[in-house]
Image (spheres, rainbow, N blue to C red):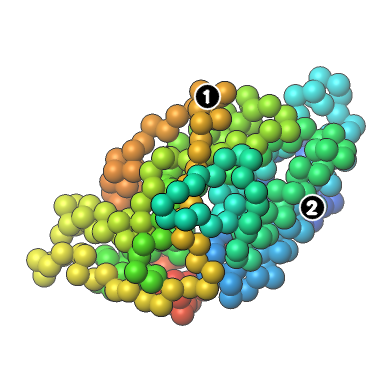
Amino acid sequence: MGNSYELNGTVVILADICDEARVLQILQQERIDAIMHLAAESHVDRSIDGPADFIRTNVVGTYHLLSAALTHWQVLPAENKARFRFHHVSTDEVFGDLPFESGIFTEESPYAPTSPYSASKAASDHLVRAWGETYGLPVVLSNCSNNYGPFHFPEKLIPLVILNALEEKPLPVYGNGENVRDWLHVDDHARALATVLFDGATGESYNIGGNAERTNLQVVEAVCDVLDQLHPRTSGDRYRDLITFVPDRPGHDRRYAIDASKIRGELGWVPKESFESGLARTVEWFLENEWWWRPIRESACAGDRLGEPKKGAA
């Protein structure tokens, strides 16, 4: 894996983060002085069915990326070395499960992952902190709540509901749909990541969230309501009529909730999108961009969990 191409004036290089020699070569050739590590297997259901890929990419891959970064950083000229940052992008799921009625994740919350996915991300968080403490590599970390928006891979909840609804398929909801997640539009997350990379204090971590807790059922119903307005069913029925409750998945955490006061107070970041405005934009995007999601949808093998593809991009 070593192909490259140009996109809007930016060179894009495709490589495997487990290929440490290739990663180091890229860092040196491109004279990189900032790394934002977003490469990860990220879908909980797939981590349950096939955890090996998650260990390889999220744990082993992070080790190789850190090793290459350290080698590169140690020989940089003083000025470049001083401004170098390794930003590790993680998830709120490393903190585990919260009660429905109380609690919120802060940067000081203990780690308590409950799925192979969250365990692999917790491991990578620990590796990054260890490289910072042991070798002095200038690292920053961020842990974010659920993202949504354009180009969201079709196996994830919101795009899955949109596309199943458009195809008049059942809209499966785990258990009774009461599990709670905090949601953040991807554009707001991207702004937060840039803020952490350039303005975050070395060695610190920052929780990023939208203060938009919703039950899974509320999210599915909200998608249905937006579709009722933008793309009504030819039958005249509501999309909510397609909602189907299915057996819960193993180890399904009840609730995640993010305290983002640190990044708001210290770095001045705040989300621009509400859940309602961001969701409307997202549904509109999927309605207008079938060219992107249709080939993915048709090429993926139908899975046995929520009608999702078994394999796909992380």
In the image, what residue occupies the spot 33% across and 38% down?
274
- Which numbered disc, 1 or 2, marks the residue that appears first in the sequence? 2
Q: Quadrant of the C terminus?
A: bottom right
Q: Looking at the image, which residue is at 54% across and 65% down?
A: 44
The amino acid marked with disc number 2 is Tyr
What distance separates the C-alpha of mark 1 from that of mark 2?
32 Å
Q: Is residue 4 visible?
A: no
Q: Is 47 left or right of 304, judged from the image as shown?
A: right
Q: Which residue is mark 2?
A: 63
Q: Residue furthest front?
A: 102
User: Which residue is at the far bottom?
Assistant: 304
* Image disc number at residue 177: none
Q: Where is residue 144 drawn, in percent x and y? A: 54, 44
Q: Secondary structure at mark 2?
A: helix
The foreground one among 268 and 284 is 268
Residue 290 falls in which quadrant of the image? Answer: bottom left
Vertical order, 78 against 227 (above or below): above
Q: Position of residue 191 (x, y in %)?
A: 50, 32
The image shows residue 39, relative to residue 56, as above or below, that is above
